[in-house]
Image (spheres, helix red, strand yellow):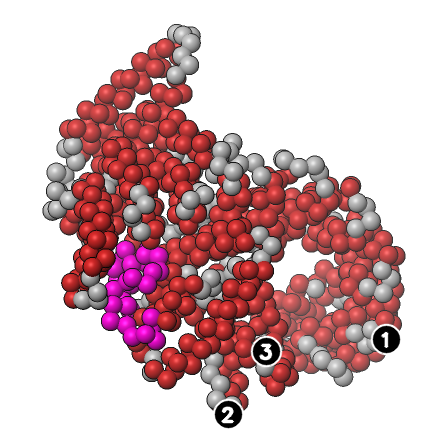
Amino acid sequence: MTKINIQPHAAKIRELLSAKRLRAAVEELRNVALTVRNNRVTAQANEIEENYNRLLGFMQSGADDPQRMTQYIRFCNKVYLLADSLERNYLSIETPSLYYGTLRYEATKSGDTVAELLGAYSKLINDSALFNLVAEESTEKKENTYQREMLERRLFNRLWVSFPLHRDTADVIRDFLASESIPLYVKQMIVSSLFLGLIEYFDDTRLALLWETYSAHASSEPALALQAMTCAVIVNMMYPGRPVTSQLESVIESATAISSWESDLRLVLTEFVRSIDTERINRKMQQEVMPELMKLQPDLKRINTEITSVEDLADLEENPEWQEKLSQSGLADKLRSLSKIQEEGGDVFMSTFAHLKAFPYFNEIANWFIPFHTDHTLLTDADEQKRTIADIIMASPFLCDSDKYSFLLSLNSIPASQRDMMLSQMKVQNINADEIRSAALNATVTDRRNIVNKFVQNLYRFFKLFRRKNEFRDPFDGSLSVADIPALVNKFNDTDTLSLVAEFYFKHHYYAEGLAIFLKLEQRVVANVQLYQKIGFCYLKLNDYENALKYFRMSELLDARSVWTRKNIAYLLFITGNFAEAEEYYAKLEEVEPDNIQFVINLGNCRMALHDYAGALKAFHKVNYINKNDIRALRAIAWCHFMLGDYNAAIKTYRTIMLKEPEAEDYINMGHLALATNDYAEAVNSYNLAVERMDNDREKVIARIMDDVTNLDRVKINTSVLPFIIDSLY
């Protein structure tokens, strides 16, 4: 086999197919197959080309062919599959990644098919059920549990690297998931393994099985169903260019008939979007909350209080004795903000548990996808205290499964006395959590949301914290868009959900993502002021001033009284150089809010840009009247006097500035004044003071002086002496 870097070639084939260039994709596939001497793929590429040419011939003859698009999609998917298989087989030879290492290992166990492993597990579960009826806690029972977990991991790994998934294997998996004897957590592991395999290579049989799992278990096992839907939606987002087969189309169509379809899909989309805010929450914890907390540690130790978690922070906030200290430090506002984030479903525990993923337990990929359960071998030799804590962790709605295992593993390093104290606190918190759930207006919706929320957090931790995370395509890297999921475009048209997602992006300053959805909403809803305002603001934040101005003007047409809209229009007109129209807007805004200093300052700036220094002077005097000795106004007043030729008034104003907060710019302007009055010695002195203010950067000051030459010429100042002045600077 000729050795080549096959991945760029496979990527090119996928790009050609995505661009609907099937013939070119087939040619590239055949060339690669010939290079690596794969006769089977070469023959199949030739067969596809022959059949496609036949289809093209029918089209050119004008013959009616209702199956044309179906055949085209079949050809495309076949080329995708051949390209994926060719790449996968080639890389499996020596690629050191975990996926290919697992694939090579499983290849040595050719007798252990997915179907056979599923059958072996079903038998083990049935045998265990009979065994547990007669057996007490014993070495044999522990060994049985250990064997069961070993088989669960084998099953997870085997299914993960099986590609493509054959229809008969999918049938066996479907029956396995339907079995009442199989523990729910094992079924969830199967779904995660299906998903992880799809991260590596697209497989419509796997994806269809995920959607079928949602449909079959939506009411009977919501945790399984919602996990399957979450995985399916993410996969659909990751492969937007893949043609949807009639089989997959039919499966998704069936899923839409489920009564909870729209509400469930809304939950999945909103919780996925919420996950992108995790990094911001982490930064808030690490850069704002924890540094302030460290400053308070000496005082905390005096009352024997230690802060190790978000809950501890909340307890501290509730202590009346600490309210004043928290307020003084600024922590109180930050804690309230974090509390609100948690109430909304934000992931506030990521930073807390990130350092607890270094346990050897997390080196095994399957362990990241095991839902927390108390039959785990981690609890085989646990005492009553640890089992009680595990039961409370199991019931906690606040931690995802991955963090629950981290918590359990960390107990081994905590003294028994501290575990007693922890246990009493956890019991109180768990009672409060039960009360919250009981008081919920719609417990079913709340529970379903928590299922999705916690599963997304599980996935997020794996893709961000797994020691070999760089070997996986990360669905949380911000590249996926919920605004465009071709496979679901005709199945889900809920403007309320799109609005909800768009508002989340907008609120948390993800303007590019929010804009994409707002623009979709523009095509679906009746024109309204707020939508145009938000589209305009997104464009503004993305520095697309032309489109920002366009949408703010559209908003103004619907509501000409909106001060906020007109303020943004005025600002955009100013920064794009349309000073005359900007001046008109600011003049009208000043009439509406005569005491708004910023409006008056901007009005003055517009007039200065238009060289209307008399009008500008009037505006800045008003600012100075409203806000006595406003340094911004004083500088503008001095410059207006200078440009109007009133040097005495300018000098007087600059002297007032010099008594306040003189900057390099002020000394440069004083130098200009001296130049205007032919006092060259004073001009050199002022410019030298500016050099000192600019950290002795002489060239920078010279550049600023030369920038003002046009203004100096405008007021007839003799600039011919500037070369001599500049050469006099030290």
- The residue nearer to you, when weighing 657 against 490, is 490
Marks 3 and 1, how far apart at CA: 62 Å
Marks 3 and 2, how far apart at CA: 18 Å
Eyeballing the image, is 689 above or below 231?
below
- The residue nearer to you, when weighing 435 against 23, is 435
Q: Secondary structure at mark 2?
A: helix
Asked if one can make out residue 610 in the rendered structure from this viewpoint, the answer is: no
The mark that comes first in sequence, 3 or 2, is 2
Q: Which mark is residue 302?
A: 2
Instruction: Residue 606: give x, y in percent of width and height.
Output: 78, 57
Q: Which residue is denoted by mark 1 in the rendering?
A: 648
Q: Secondary structure at mark 1?
A: helix
Residue that sits furthest to the bottom in the current view: 302
* On-image quarter of the C terminus: bottom right
Q: Which residue does the image show at 39% across and 26% down from the upper left?
A: 246
Q: Amino acid at mark 3?
A: Glu
Is 378 inside the magenta-drawn segment? yes
- Tag in front: 1 or 2: 2
Q: Which residue is denoted by mark 3 in the rendering?
A: 318
Q: Which residue does the image show at 83% across and 78% down from the upper left?
A: 652
Apparent side of residue 155 relative to residue 585 in the rendered image (left or right): left
- The residue nearer to you, when weighing 478 against 308, is 308
Mark 3 neighbour class, 10 Å CA radius: few under 14, some 14 to 19, many 20 or more = few
Eyeballing the image, is 580 above or below 718?
above
- Magenta stretch? 359-387
**Which quadrant of the figure has residue 523?**
top right
Q: Which residue does the image show at 38% across and 67% down from the upper left?
A: 391
Eyeballing the image, is 667 above or below 184?
below
Q: Which mark is residue 492?
A: none
